[in-house]
Amino acid sequence: MSGWIDADYVGAAFNGKDLSEVEFVHSKFIRCRFVGTRLTEAKAENCRFEECDFSGARMNAATFSDTSFANSTFRGAHFFLTRFERCRLIGASFVEADLGGLVVIESDWSWAILRHQNLEGAELRGTKLVEADLDEANLKKADLRQTDLTRANLQHARLTGADLRGANLTQVDLRGLDLRGVRLNVEHAILLAQCYGAKVE
């Protein structure tokens, strides 16, 4: 496995390159382009990929820890069995991306665009999803325990069988959602009642 250590790039283009199994350590990439780049089984630790374009990139089975992808674009990228641990993807866009088998641990995906995403069975426990756009996302059987979904857009999301115990659902509109088989706390039941105008005393 080759490695990039303490690399520092601004505005560089790595489009179409094969960076499979490459290890990135303490490196910084600002406004760089990885369009169509192969990053299969790559690893990144303590890195910054900010405002980067990963459109069409293949990141299957890659592992990222303590790394930031803030405001980056992943249109049409592939993340099969990809693992993010303690990573920041604030404001990242995943339009038309493939997130099958995704594992996210203690990461911050606030303001991320995840519309129409298939996250069925995804492990998202403890993830921050503040104001994330999950409109029409498939969250069936997803592990959403202890997630922070404050003001997240769950309109038309499919939640059948999801586990929301301990999740923060502050200012989330639960009306109209199919909650069959969803695991909730008593606090969530109260929030649901209040969404329909009930006064809980």
Image: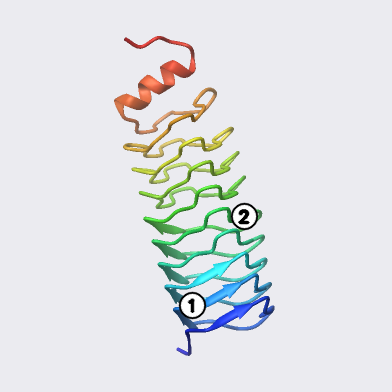
Q: Seen in the image, is 13 located left or right of residue 59?
A: right
Observer-nearest of 47 and 135: 47
- Using the image, determine if residue 26 lies above or below residue 88: below
Q: Quadrant of residue 184?
A: top left
Q: Quadrant of residue 169?
A: top left
Kindly state the secondary structure of the residue where label 2 is placed: loop
Q: Which residue is mark 2?
A: 93
- Nearer the N terminus, badge 1 or badge 2? 1
The residue that appears at 49% across and 65% down in the rendered structure is: 68
Q: Residues within 10 Å of mark 1 (few under 14, many from 20)?
A: many
Q: Which residue is mark 1?
A: 42
Q: Position of residue 161 (x, y in %)?
A: 41, 37
Q: Position of residue 39 (x, y in %)?
A: 55, 76
Name the kind of residue labelled 1 in the image. Answer: Ala
The residue that appears at 60% across and 39% down in the rendered structure is: 136
Q: Position of residue 101 (x, y in %)?
A: 46, 59
Name the kind of residue labelled 2 in the image. Answer: Ser
- Using the image, determine if residue 44 lies above or below residue 195: below
Q: Quadrant of residue 36?
A: bottom right
Quadrant where the C terminus sits is top left
Q: Residues within 10 Å of mark 2 (few under 14, many from 20)?
A: many
